[in-house]
Image (spheres, rainbow, N blue to C red):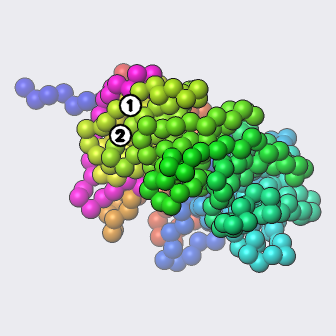
């Protein structure tokens, strides 16, 4: 007797969303969805729209352009859509928008600015060792940190990392250029707070690259800031408290868990280090190669470039389950997004083949039936989302919202 087909774990509703304000023949405009507060924002090319509980609002033209744009929640329900040095402030009811371009005198700074956070009545941009406050009223002020956070003997500005301060209260500037790991917090008034510096010996800072701190690979999670070195040293700030940790393995990537930092090396070895410096556990994955590392509520998840996924118990380091995302020999993983107790995996496009997405958790791999996926994530209610551009020459993309099916 033929086996019964396993029912799909998710049921999708399909939504048409605006991808551009002016369709062009021969062009497909991508879309992206970003959650801000209790709503989601669909960002297209020069156009945004709201998405609330699976209902799409009317499209609104804005100056911030492209699917690489980001969206931030702002005061009194407004939304800020940002792309490079441009941002638009959208009214809470998505009825109007005011667009701004940020201009500074220094050409080098101008080229490297990116919006990092939105605080009260201003957007905070950072790049090239400078933080810029761009007020919603058009006023622009800047704070030059180059003389304060960069070692004069190693003035490479690309060694600075910029992250949104937890809860969106400002910008965290991470300095990995010197012998010490240093962090400067910048609030909406451009007031700076320097956290305690963290030292490490030279041997622990040497690994995959030249000796030093890897500020651009730092992670901010809640009140925790974690910066890896190029070797085995880890700098961690929990609130205003600084901790210098030692990893038992050389650090390729790191993630922040509950009271711990999880690291992985180039040989698929994992280690978990508590904030007090205790090594909680170590393990070796059976399949080498980890390109993505995430810390979920109960599990550490690793994803290899060829689709091998492992779930490791955060408390014990025990291997809980493994799965293989079905890829062709030519395909590799592009994006991995945390999604509740699992991850959404999106392969990299190869040639003309359509891109599909997969949800993976401890129960296995579930294909998400959406062709030519451009990205994936969670909406404000925790439902899975995938999105894709519309047809060539069209003005709409497609968002699919995935809810659990009948059990």
User: Against 46, is 93 above or below?
Assistant: above
Across and down, in percent, residue 39 comes to 68, 40
The residue positioned 56% from the left and 41% from the top of the image is 234
Q: Are marks 1 and 2 in contact (CB under 8 Å)?
A: yes
Structural distance between the alpha carbons of marks 1 and 2: 7 Å
Decide whether residue 345 is among the magenta residues. Answer: no
Q: Residue at x 73, y 75 (%)?
A: 108
Picture coordinates of residue 244, whole percent (x, y): 61, 37
Q: Quadrant of residue 301?
A: top left
Label 1: element kind: strand
Q: Disc 1 or 2, which lies upstream in sequence?
A: 2
Task: Using the rendered image of the protein, determine whether residue 61 is visible from the camera's viewpoint.
Answer: no
**Quarter of the figure that contains the C terminus:** top left
Horizontally, is 288 left or right of 222 in the view? Answer: left
Query: Does residue 122 appear in the picture of this structure?
Result: yes
Residue annotated with mark 2:
269
SS assignment at label 2: strand
| Residues shaded magenta | 313-334
Crowding near the residue tagged with mark 2, few <14, some 14–19, many ≥20 C-alpha atoms within 10 Å: many
Q: Report the front residue among 31 and 147.
A: 147
Which residue is labeled 1 in the image? Answer: 282
* Residue 199 percent coordinates (x, y): 64, 44
Please indicate whether residue 371 sits to the left or right of residue 146 in the image.
left
Residue occupying the far left of the picture: 1
């Amino acid at each position: 007797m033929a086996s019964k087909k396993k029912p799909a774990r998710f049921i999708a509703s399909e939504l048409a969303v605006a991808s551009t304000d002016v369709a062009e023949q021969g062009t497909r405009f991508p879309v992206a969805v970003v959650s801000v507060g209790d709503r989601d924002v669909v960002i297209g090319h020069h156009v945004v729209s709201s998405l609330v509980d699976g209902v799409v609002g009317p499209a609104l033209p804005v100056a911030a352009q492209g699917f690489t744009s980001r969206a931030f929640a702002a005061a009194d329900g407004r939304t800020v859509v940002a792309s490079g040095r441009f941002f638009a402030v959208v009214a809470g009811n998505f009825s109007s928008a005011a667009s701004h371009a940020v201009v500074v005198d220094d050409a080098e700074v101008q080229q490297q600015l990116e919006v990092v956070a939105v605080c009260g009545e201003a957007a905070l941009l950072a790049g090239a060792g400078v933080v810029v406050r761009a007020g919603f009223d058009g006023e622009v002020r800047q704070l030059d940190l180059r003389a304060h956070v960069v070692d004069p003997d190693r003035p490479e500005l690309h060694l600075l990392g910029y992250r949104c301060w937890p809860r969106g209260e400002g910008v965290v500037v991470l300095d990995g250029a010197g012998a010490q790991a240093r962090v400067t917090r910048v609030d909406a008034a451009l007031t700076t707070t320097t956290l305690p510096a963290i030292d490490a010996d030279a041997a622990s800072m040497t690994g995959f690259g030249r000796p030093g701190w890897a500020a651009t690979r730092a992670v901010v999670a809640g009140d925790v800031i974690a910066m890896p070195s190029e070797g085995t040293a880890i700098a961690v700030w929990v609130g205003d408290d600084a901790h210098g940790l030692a990893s038992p393995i050389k650090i390729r990537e790191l993630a922040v868990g509950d009271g711990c930092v999880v690291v992985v090396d180039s040989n698929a070895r994992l280690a978990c280090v508590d904030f007090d410096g205790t090594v909680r556990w170590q393990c070796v994955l059976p399949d080498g190669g980890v390109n993505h590392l995430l810390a979920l509520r109960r599990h550490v998840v690793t994803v290899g470039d060829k689709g091998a996924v492992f779930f490791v118990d955060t408390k014990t380091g025990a291997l809980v389950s493994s799965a293989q995302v079905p890829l062709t020999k030519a395909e590799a993983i592009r994006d991995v997004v945390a999604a509740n107790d699992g991850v959404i995996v999106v392969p990299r496009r190869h040639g003309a083949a359509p891109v599909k997405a997969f949800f993976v958790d401890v129960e296995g791999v579930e294909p998400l039936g959406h062709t030519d996926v451009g990205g994936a994530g969670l909406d404000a209610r925790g439902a899975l989302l995938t999105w894709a551009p519309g047809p060539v020459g069209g003005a709409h993309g497609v968002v699919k919202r995935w809810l659990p099916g009948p059990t």
